[in-house]
Image: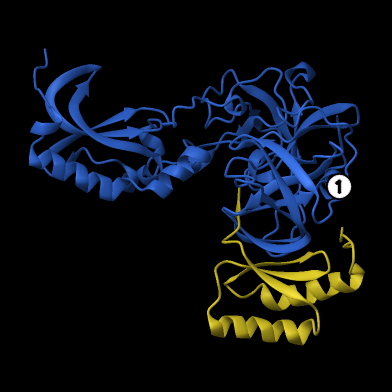
Amino acid sequence: MANLVLSRSSIPQTLLDAKKSAMADFFTEGDVAMAVTFLAHPNPRHNVMGIGLGRKLVKGKLTDVPCVRFYVERKLDKQAISKEFMLPQRIGQVATDVIASGRFWAYAGASKERSRLRPARPGCSIGFAFTGAQSGNIMAGTFGAVVESGGKRFILSNNHVLAHENALPLGSTIFQPGLLDKNTPQTDKIGKLSKFVTLETANPNHVDCAIAEILENNLVSPTVMPKVNKLKSGQPVVATVGMRVEKTGRTTGYTSGTIRDISANVKVGYDLGTLTFEDQIIIVGGTKSFSDAGDSGSLIVEQKSKRPVGLLFAGSDSHTIANHIEDVLQQLNVSIVA
Amino acid sequence: MPKQDESGGHDLLETKQRLSAKLMPLDFISGVGIAGSKLVVYLVRPLEPEESKEVREIVDANAPGRPFEFVTTGVFKKK
């Protein structure tokens, strides 16, 4: 039975020094924020949620070995991590332990938008599974709307949420919730990638959009999550400067804001590089930011008419960027189900 | 599909496109847009005096007499 006693007043200096070193090397607030909101990554700088001190666990039992404890969002298969990204087995003379703690939240629990929902509704978490060299990464974006074409129903979101920036083949499985929110791919399949508009690196883009055919129609409902709720019509309304808009998204839930620009040309950072988008909508939030990472794919709705106006895909801390929804529907040749 | 703004029409859209071609290659520019009848130059960060002068000269040359404003947005990224 383990009997080493560790208290805050009796921590050996070697342990404190090892923890300090681990904090400097593997933990930064900015990186953690990114991992929490959008993507888990094999690079420990993007996966470590916390660092502490305790006794090493071996096969689920506490030992007498004092150690630095790395709390990670999830343990990744060793084969998915290159050597340079492996957490060290020792820091100086001090042993380490890696504990899968999940994400730490400010006592809020998992939001409804990040949960598994059947029927799934626009506003909830959705996403794809990484393949190839990126296997092990997990992500989530937002289910924007139910759309239809030729008697079939589809989930509308962004290319970068459903098709991994042009990388996935048609037919790839789509999950609800996105695997970042509940990593159970066996039970959470909801659709298959059907069509996307290619993101261009050398020419200007107008849309970042894709659709996934729903596996069974009763798996989804077109009613947007609160407080947007049911659309009055799926017919788009033309964006105008000063228009009051709202959305429900996977990360920030329900937010409202105001359209500030209806024809912006912008540069947007992607994994593919910096892409140019022309003729975009720019929105600013009311008392808080209109969106954050993971809200991509959200349908933006005019508050007054309850009709769709944009598809959220990018932004900064202060400004949100959306495609004109009529451009999205035209390019994909679909219509929104209200 | 280009959108016609509420006040300036296609002339303003053409001006924005012309200005955009000149300004977008600059590192500290995040975008160029239209708010009502005004052009908007979006910035990655507040400009140094010489950068501001450079942008104003480009605007004056490509959109003479057009009102415009700077808005600092930070870097845009996919969300």
Location of residue B36 by image quarter: bottom right
Q: Is residue A168 visible?
A: no
Tell me: A259 left or right of B7: left
Determine which residue is flagged by label 1.
A326
Q: Which lettered chain is shown in yellow?
A: B
Q: Is residue A11 visible?
A: yes
Residue B9 at what x, y percent from top left?
Answer: 91, 68
Image quadrant where one finds the N terminus of chain B: bottom right
Residue A225 at what x, y percent from top left?
Answer: 71, 27
Q: Residue at x 87, y 38 (%)?
A: A305
For mark 1, name the chain.
Answer: A
Tell me: A240 left or right of A173: right
Residue ranking furthest to the top: A1
* Closer-to-camera residue (A305/A182): A305
Find chain A in the image and tell me its colour: blue
* Closer-to-camera residue (A90/A258): A258
Tell me: A40 left or right of A87: right
Amino acid type shown at disc 1: Glu
Residue B28 at what x, y percent from top left?
Answer: 57, 72
